[in-house]
Image (cartoon, rainbow, N blue to C red):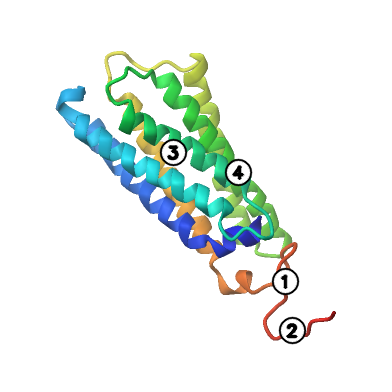
Amino acid sequence: MIQTMIRNWWLLAVCGVLNAAACGIYFIIEGSNRPLSLYTWGGTIKLLGELTLAAGLVAIAGGIWRSARGRCWQLVLNGIALAALGAIYVFFVRVPISFRTIALLVVLMAISAGILELQVAGALRGIRHTADGWVLGLTGTVSVAFALAFLGFVFGWIKLDPGSPGQSFLWLGTYFGFSAMGMMWLALRLHRPDLSRSGQWGGAAPVFGAPTHA
């Protein structure tokens, strides 16, 4: 799994950039004084959906492409949830969708990302990249916290203020912004030459120049 992500680090980075663009759109909508209506924001929501759908497809590719040593199913699940949310925005923009449905997809994104980040953090600490491991461990913990928060929206434990219609966009923008930073940080850490060339990962290829045995 780790080797698959090392090979596909640039796909993780692209996914992070697309998430960052989606974050910007969420904050633009939330901070605008214009009415939150389909007539006003229909084109913007469709663009948001296209970015989110693209991010999901890129994440799925990052989890399965060049995966001779093992697919990254956590990344695939994250991509499926992202793609589903993007498809809702693009193809069902005129169909009333409750925030609970969107929150459930965010729960899947956040919990899959959190588990992935915690696993990579443990692996990094195992090969003595302690600082990177602790940073990713903290990122994974916050991702799980986001999953719990959005689960609160799903089950009604956390209520949105009816007088603040942009509050849901603030929550979504905050999550997508954090997700973008986490994905790009993960991509940069996995792209380090000492990791991609190291034989310390389970199933990894030997260090370049090291002798091999039949």
> Which badge, 4 or 1, comes first in the chain's sequence?
4
Residue 102 point in image, percent of width and height:
42, 26
Inspect the image, locate mark 3, and give the three-letter code of the amino acid beneath it.
Answer: Ala
Inspect the image, locate mark 1, and give the three-letter code of the amino acid beneath it.
Answer: Gly
Disc assigned to residue 83: 3
Task: Identify the residue at horizontal 70%, vertical 86% (top origin).
Answer: 209
User: How far apart in space, not on screen, are marks 3 and 4 (Cα)?
Assistant: 14 Å
Could you say whether the residue bearing mark 2 is in a helix, strand or loop? loop
Pointers 3 and 4 in contact (C-beta within 8 Å) = no
User: How far apart in space, not on screen, are marks 4 and 1 (Cα)?
Assistant: 23 Å
Disc assigned to residue 210: 2
> Which badge, 2 or 3, comes first in the chain's sequence?
3
Q: Is residue 69 visible?
A: yes
Task: Identify the residue at horizontal 31%, vertical 13% (top origin).
Answer: 162
- Nearer to me, 191 or 39: 39
Q: Which residue is mark 4?
A: 74
What crowding class fits label 4: few (fewer than 14 Cα within 10 Å), some (14-19), or many (20 or more)? Answer: many
Pointers 2 and 3 in contact (C-beta within 8 Å) = no
Where 82 falls versus 151 (above or below)?
below
User: How far apart in space, not on screen, are marks 2 and 3 (Cα)?
Assistant: 42 Å
User: How far apart in space, not on screen, are marks 4 and 2 (Cα)?
Assistant: 32 Å
> Which badge, 4 or 2, comes first in the chain's sequence?
4
Q: Which residue is mark 1?
A: 199
Could you say whether the residue bearing mark 3 is in a helix, strand or loop? helix
